Amino acid sequence: MRITALAGGIGGARFLRGLRHELRSRAGGSSVTVVVNTADDITLHGLRVCPDLDTVMYTLGGGIHEKQGWGREAERFTVAEELAAYGSQPDWFTLGDRDFATHIIRTRMLAQGFSLSQITRALCERWEPGVLLLPMSDDPVETHVVIDDPEADGGVRAVHFQEWWVRLHAAVPARQILALGIETAKPAPGVLEALTDADVILLPPSNPVVSIGTILGVPGVRDALRTSTAPVVGVSPIISGAPVRGMADACLTAIGVATSASAVAGLYADFLDGWLVADQDTAEVSRLAEQHPDLRVLARPLLMTDVPAAAAIAADALDLALSLRQPSAAR
């Protein structure tokens, strides 16, 4: 069975770890390909940082800081302290010593002419994530956020998504969220084939705007999902009208979408076949039945409190997809 997933950072990584755990308990072979958001990428201190790729790689490779959900376990911050002593900016995004090594290797290989896909494959040789990780594109795409700033010309300015998310904690309302470079970006090698050839396509509970949404914005990706014969099943990142973690509600507000499981499903309505909502959101099941009568919706526990809980969610998503495995070309 060929499974393809689209994923962002922490929520996507933990779901995928649960999926891998679940697949190991099932008979029959399977392969998992993960298309990862790279529009959060940023250059810091001259180094190219890919937060979502690294979070998925570290989580599946056993090196993640479990409590944070990002960064390396047993991390030290000697280099960050030295940079601060020099007054080096920015000081709001702290990289650990172990993490620095990943970014140094990536930046060096980029300078040598390797693509992000090739670099990701090389990094994964160490971490052995048990899945094939593909960046959504080898072309640089960066998400920027337009915010009000009375001191700026015109009263507004654009900041990198990471500054809005990490430094400002998304507390300043976003006027616009822009994925710069996405119109001309090409899907990375293997991305479209992973969607076209899949037996099952899964959407983990990642941010629907700046993670899944930017992957869908890469030309050709959304069309591949629409025409794929594989069932597409997603897991809601919204429970009881709030994101499970992070500030996805601020992102949804910026694009004029309500923070609800049904509203997020609506963002995927042109290709989505199945949708898991939280067991306390039974009203969403009825609402979705009215809005999208062809969409199969199930209410299940969706809190990924540990690996077994994440595996149970992955099992529910996978079982729903398998029950829908019929040609879907008429979406």
Image (cartoon, helix red, strand yellow):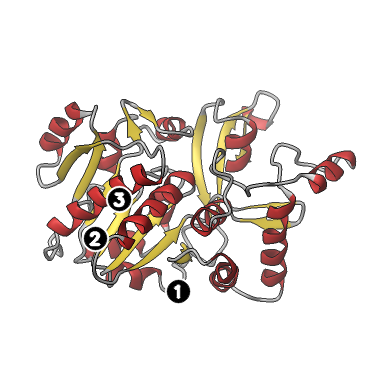
Residue 284 placement, left or right of 51: left
Residue at x-position 17% and y-position 40%: 298
Cα–Cα gap, marks 2 and 1: 19 Å
Residue lying at the far top in this picture: please name it. Answer: 150
Q: Residues within 10 Å of mark 3 (few under 14, many from 20)?
A: many
Residue at x-position 77% and y-position 44%: 77
Residue type marked 2: Arg
Residue 1's spot in the image, x, y percent? Answer: 25, 69
Tell me the element at label 3: helix
Which mark is first along the chain, 3 or 1?
A: 1
Cα–Cα gap, marks 3 and 2: 22 Å
Mark sitting on residue 320: none
Residue 264 falls in image quadrant: top left
Tell me the element at label 1: loop
Whether residue 331 can be seen here: no
Residue at x-position 63% and y-position 47%: 73
Residue 318 falls in image quadrant: bottom left
- Disc tally is 3
Residue type marked 1: Pro
Q: Say which of marks 1 and 3 sits in front.
A: 3
**32 and 113: which is toward the camera:** 32
Q: Which residue is mark 3?
A: 314
Tell me the element at label 2: helix
Q: Which residue is mark 2?
A: 226
Residue 325 falls in image quadrant: bottom left
Mark sitting on residue 189: 1
Residue 56 placement, left or right of 282: right
Residue 217's spot in the image, x, y percent? Answer: 40, 55
